Amino acid sequence: MHTLGSTFVPPGIHAGGLRYHGMAPLVSHVMDLGLAEATTVQQLDAFAAGIQFARAEGIIPAPEANHAVAVAISEALRAKEEGEQRTILFSLSGHGHFDMQSYIAYQAGKLENYEYPAEEIAMALAGLPTVG
């Protein structure tokens, strides 16, 4: 399993609901096989995508799902720019009805992007055991 270890504690930022410091074994395996690639989305971009999706589809995504929405939008725009037709599949893992305060904070400019320091990640990874 891909993880930053049990000692890793993310900062107290919103981060679009993403606080888990590991990746499920099945997802880890898919990544190891090269069937998927990981990417990042800053939380302000994620919330902007969630609002765009809500306006277009009438569904308010959960903040965690906004990251997938943002990448799907990005991939669609890239395909359009390249003149290619693509099928883009993403998982909308939940609605945001319980997360309206997060959307209010985003709209009020109270959320900010955060880059976790690379040295902190390196320290967390250094403490992990080697698994064969």
Image (cartoon, rainbow, N blue to C red):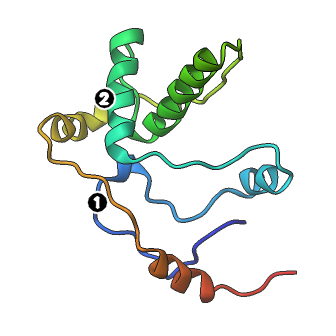
Q: Secondary structure at mark 1?
A: loop
Q: Residue at x 38, y 63 (%)?
A: 115
Residue beneath disc 1? 13
Amino acid, disc 2: His
Q: Position of residue 116 (x, y in %)?
A: 40, 68
Q: Secondary structure at mark 2?
A: helix
Q: Position of residue 65 (x, y in %)?
A: 47, 36
Amino acid, disc 1: Ile
**As drawn, 74 above or below 45:** above
- Quadrant containing the C terminus is bottom right
Q: Earlier in the sequence, mark 1 or mark 2?
A: 1
Q: Residue at x 33, y 59 (%)?
A: 114
Comparing marks 1 and 2, which lies closer to the viewer? 1
Residue beneath disc 2? 97
Label at residue 122: none
Say which quarter of the image contains residue 56. Answer: top left
**As drawn, 77 above or below 110:** above
Q: Position of residue 111 (x, y in %)?
A: 21, 48
**As drawn, 8 above or below 28:** below
Left or right: residue 89 compared with residue 34? left
Structural distance between the alpha carbons of marks 1 and 2 = 20 Å
- Quadrant containing the N terminus is bottom right
Decide: few, some or many residues near mark 1? Use Cα within 10 Å; few <14, some 14-19, many ≥20. some
